[in-house]
Image (spheres, helix red, strand yellow):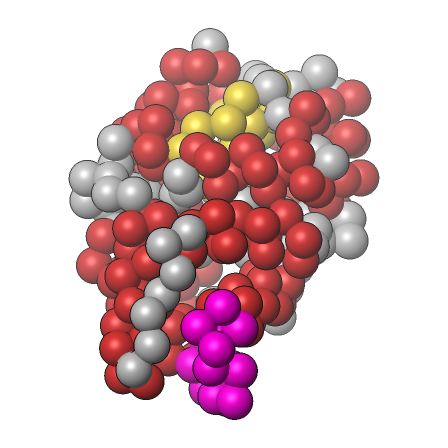
Amino acid sequence: MLRAVFFDFVGTLITKEGENVTHQNIVREVLRRAGREGLDYMRLWEEYEAESSAMFKELAGKPYVKIRDVDTEAMRRVAGRYGFTVPADFWEISISMHERYGGLFPDAVETIKALKELGLHIGIITDSDNDYIGAHLRALGIYDMFDSITTSEDAGFYKPHEGPFRLALERAGVEAGEALYVGDNPSKDCVGAKKVGMLSVLLDPKGEKRELWGNCDFVVSKLGEVVEIVKGLMEK
């Protein structure tokens, strides 16, 4: 019997497009503070994203290190190429821009409400620092919609390590076979969930990850489809 549904955050509840806009504005603010507004912020954003992505790929499944430190180091590497200094309060700038610009998928709130009406535990399992996810969820007005929030900071490991998933199940008081996890990364979300025995749903709006669909139990193009999957599982 299904008793809980957990969600990833970036790319699952909030759009990657919105996250890109957020990061672009982080770079713009850093340049403004450094007095280097004449630089092409889009070019620097692309370099920042490349640095950050490469660093995070190396951390997959490994012990947790603060995301604030990874992001700050990525920005410092870019700044070093252009001869300016990253502000000491870079992480505070980052959080404020996430609060201002982050955007949910259009059917995110409706989906969460529909699942809660089914009497399910609704949680988040995300590779995140606690201050980031808390501030972002409150800014979006959905913090109180979740029964539990489990981060890589809490668990001490990044997905697809079993740690974040096992801790989330423990907090929800459910067995792995009673839980479903929804994410957008087949290699981290689906693989990590299946390691502990949870069912997994891949959100792939454009069908761009077809070669990795086999890692997942279900594939959807929009969040609303998760509700029908859940209803079907609850009838079994």
Q: Quadrant of the N terminus?
A: top right
In front: 225, or 161? 161
The extreme front residue here reads 35
Question: Can residue 175 be seen here?
Answer: no
In magenta segment, residue 33 = yes
Residue extending farthest to the top is 173
Along the viewing direction, whichever of 13 and 20 lies nearer the viewer: 20
Q: Is residue 180 magenta?
A: no
In depth, the one of 186 and 93 nearer the eye is: 93
Q: Tell me where the magenta segment starts and ends, as one range.
A: 31-45
- Which x, y percent locates residue 109? 76, 40
**Residue drawn where x is 63% and y is 48% of the image:** 99
Residue at 45%, 59% (x, y): give it. Answer: 213
User: Can residue 146 be spotted in the picture?
Assistant: yes
Horizontal side of 220 relative to 73 (left or right) equals right
Which residue is at the front of the view, 112 or 231?
112
| Residue 95, position as x, y percentages in the image | 53, 48
Does residue 15 sit above or below 138 in this rendering? below
> Residue 111, percent across and down?
74, 39
Which quadrant of the figure has residue 168?
Answer: top left
Q: Residue at x 34, y 36 (%)?
A: 152
* Main SS category, magenta section: helix
